[in-house]
Amino acid sequence: MAQKKYFFATSYIVLLLAFAGCSSALKISARADASQSYALSVDIGKTLSQTIQSAAEGLSAMSGAAQTSGSTVLFETEKIRHALEQSGFKNAQVSSPEFSQLSISASGTIEGLVKQGKNYLAVNLSPQTVGALLSYVPEETRSYIDLFMAPVFTGEQMTAEEYAELVSVIYGESLAEELKKSAVQLTLASPAGKTKSFSIPLADFLTLSQKQTYTVSW
């Protein structure tokens, strides 16, 4: 049960980054006690927001559930905050001022994905560390994720260009173009404040097939 709670919380951090559109940024700061501070800001953008809202209406129709206009909620802030706290994160703050936006701040550790040593902080991304999280997210969230058939989750070998073409065929050129120009901004910081930033193209992240490590040393 403890492991499931842990994955439930950390899944949001990774999966929300995975499907962010025009603006997504994560800052991880190493702390002297070997834990980290996390600050996540996500805006999935108008095109993806509309796609998800349409998908939610379709899922409701298929399940026979009634849905009133404007009732779709993408980021359930209280559930996310509670999951973070149950997983051992401290000072968790979660807000969603608009349907497409989410901000999270908290302190704690994410074993497997983040590793902190005596003089370094590293983030390890791989299909294994990312894909394993799917089993621990809410069913509705998995339904949204499944709609995008990202190779990093499905295990299918596909280039970024091939995936963008697939998105274009299924969801239209506008979303495919947004995918191509989007990137995840990752910033790592030492306890003393030394930072190193990385821009990870979203299409590359969603088609990740091998382990990628991002590090700041001090």
Image (tube, rainbow, N blue to C red):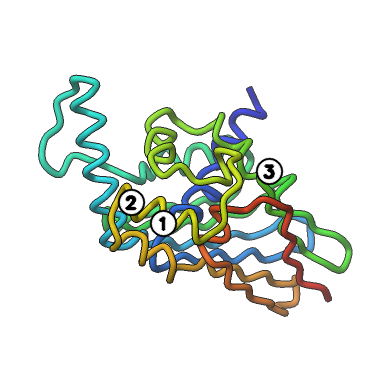
Question: Which quadrant would the C terminus be assigned to in this image?
Answer: bottom right
Left or right: residue 50 versus residue 216 is: left
Q: Nearer the viewer, residue 68 or 107?
A: 68
Q: CA distance from mark 1 to mark 2?
A: 6 Å
Q: Position of residue 204 (x, y in %)?
A: 57, 61
Q: Is residue 188 above or below residue 15?
A: below
- Residue pushed farthest right? 118
Q: Earlier in the sequence, mark 2 or mark 3?
A: 3
Q: Look at the numbered disc 2 and give the secondary structure of its residue.
A: helix
| Rendered image quadrant of residue 191 | bottom right
Circle 3 residues within 10 Å: few <14, some 14–19, many ≥20: some
Q: Is residue 15 above or below residue 144?
A: below
Q: CA distance from mark 2 to mark 3?
A: 29 Å
Q: Which residue is mark 3?
A: 129
Q: Amino acid at mark 3?
A: Thr
Q: State the residue at coordinates (59%, 68%).
A: 186
Q: Which residue is mark 1?
A: 165
Q: State the residue at coordinates (43%, 37%).
A: 146
Which mark lies nearer to you, 1 or 3? 1
User: Is label 1 in contact with label 2 (beta carbons under 8 Å)?
Assistant: yes
Which mark lies nearer to you, 2 or 3? 2
Left or right: residue 215 versus residue 57 is: right
Q: Amino acid at mark 2?
A: Val
